[in-house]
Image (cartoon, grey):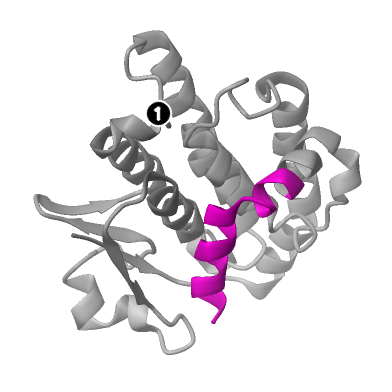
Amino acid sequence: MLKLYYTAGTCALASHITLEEVGADYSTVRISFDANQQNSPEYLAINPKGRIPSLVTDRGILTETPAMLAYIAQCYPQAKLAPFDDAFAFAEVQSFNSFICSSLHVAHAHRMRGHRWAYEESSFRDMQRKVPESVGSHYRLIEEHMFRGPWVMGDSYTICDPYLFTLAQWMEGDGLDPSDFPKVKDHRQRMSERATVQRAIAEETR
C-alpha cells in the first residue's frame, strides 16, 4: 500500500488528488510545519531533503511531485492520466509539470521562503514585492501558450490538472487576481467540483 506524507496547503495536494483519481489503496501521514516535523530525525530518515511530499512505495521512497505523479499514473494505467503510448505527448506532460515545479512553485516560494536564497530581512521583503510580477508572468505563459483546454493538455484529463489546480489555490495569496487569467480560473473552479478533489481536500483540512 502506498503512503503519502503531506502537509495541508502544500503541493502534496496534487499527489493526494491523483491517488484519489486512480482509486489507489493508500494511507496518509500529516506532517506539521508548525512543529517543524519536516526536520525531525524520523522524517529526515524518510526524506533527507526535509521537504513535503514523500511517497512510500513497496520499492522505496519517491520525492518530487512530477516524479510522484508520473509514478502513480504508470501504476494505474487504466485511469489514463498520462499518454504512455505516445512518447512525445508524455514528454509534453512532463514538460508542463516540470515548469510548475521548477518555475511557478519556486517563484511562489519567494513569498515565504526567502531564507533559502538570502540572509537579510530586507532581501526577503524585496523578494515578496516581486512575487506578484514573477508568479503572474508564469500564469500568463500558462494562460496564453500552455493551457490547451478544456484540460491542461486538451480534451483528456491528465496528471497536469491536479498539479495546476493545487498551485492555483495560492493565486490570491501571491497577490494575483484570478480574473486576469480566465482559463486558469475556470479550470480551478471545475477542478474544485470533482469528487476526487473534494475528498482529498476534506481529508487534509479535517
Q: Which residues are magenta?
A: 189-206
In the picture shown, does residue 168 fall above or below 140?
below
Q: Point out residue 202 in the picture as x, y percentages from the top left corner.
A: 56, 71
Residue bearing mark 1? 80
Q: Nearer the viewer, residue 34 or 193?
A: 193
Q: Is residue 77 above or below residue 197?
A: above
As helix, strand or loop, the secondary structure at mark 1 comes to loop
Residue at the (37%, 64%) spot, across then down:
51
Q: Give the amino acid at mark 1.
A: Lys
Q: Nearer the viewer, residue 180 or 187?
A: 187
- Say which quarter of the image contains residue 76: top left
Task: Give percent across and percent down for residue 45.
Answer: 16, 71
Image location (x, y in percent) of residue 44: 22, 72
**Residue 45, placed above or below residue 194:** below
Q: Main secondary structure of the magenta part?
A: helix
- Residue found farthest to the bottom: 35
At x 85%, y 36%, the residue is 182
